[in-house]
Image (cartoon, rainbow, N blue to C red):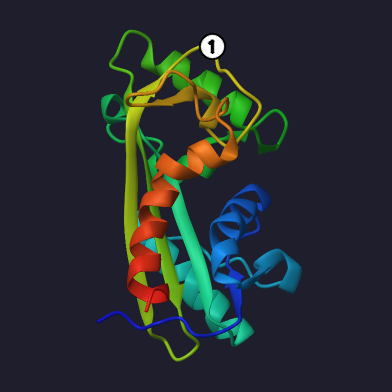
Amino acid sequence: MARKFTEKKLVVASHNEGKVREIRDLLVPYGVEVLSSKELDLTEPVEDGDSFVANAEIKSNSAASESGMVSLADDSGLVVPALDGAPGIHSARYAYNPWKEERDFGYAMGKLNLELGEKSREAHFVCALSLAWPDGHVETFEGKVFGALTWPIRGENGFGYDPMFIADGHQETFGEMKPNAKHAISHRADAFKKLIDACFNT
């Protein structure tokens, strides 16, 4: 049996405002007040795990330990089999633009398109969600959504690689979809459903 979440407040262990907003939207029905690592000025731990699950647990444990509150961390990324699974757990690092000296997903998507060339464009997003308590207990769930990459990119919604990704059975990129349509099918929604069923629903 998974441990149930019974608190009124939750820390989302992320400094990514797009990700925090998406998780906050998903938690609205449960009446949970969401705070972010950025709001609480928490340390960003070194993510040196070898999987999405390992990195999510590093972040959730760090935030729970530092804040004394139950913390939820997400580690997610884009996996392209034709590129041996890249960018994978390095999806954020892959977006570093050396000319701008900052993370730049427009640059990252252009780089991906060039590297793929004529190779298969099949891809999937993975999301690991880890819920950690200050006493060290952790519950972690993984979700996926499969699709393909398109070029040129399309859409202003979402964040990260969303304007390049079309989920199987759909015509719009995640960047073109309305947030509620994306939330219904995304990798984060898949992991979130497993988390809610295990830890929130009585």
- Say which quarter of the image contains residue 198: bottom left
- Say which quarter of the image contains residue 196: bottom left
Instruction: Say whether residue 132 is visible.
Output: yes
- The location of residue 189, given as percent across then percent down, is 43, 50
For the N terminus, give its image quadrant: bottom left
Between 40 and 190, the residue placed more toward the observer is 190
Amino acid at dot 1:
Pro
Between 178 and 150, the residue placed more toward the observer is 178
Q: Residue at x 57, y 36 (%)?
A: 160
Q: Residue at x 46, y 22 (%)?
A: 112
Q: Secondary structure at mark 1?
A: loop
Task: Give the vertical position of 88 relative to 189 (above or below).
Answer: above
Left or right: where 108 falls relative to 192: right
- The location of residue 175, given as percent across then percent down, is 57, 28
For the C terminus, give its image quadrant: bottom left
- The location of residue 195, given as percent across then percent down, is 38, 66
Tell me the residue that label 1 is attached to: 152
In the image, farthest residue toward the top: 118
- Say which quarter of the image contains residue 144: top left
Q: Residue at x 49, y 21 (%)?
A: 172
Instruction: Say whether residue 93 is visible.
Output: no
In the image, farthest residue toward the bottom: 135
- The location of residue 107, given as percent across then percent down, is 60, 25
Q: Residue at x 58, y 51 (%)?
A: 22
Count the marks: how many? Answer: 1
Task: Give the vertical position of 178 relative to 187 (above or below).
Answer: above
Task: Give the vertical position of 7 relative to 200 (above or below).
Answer: below
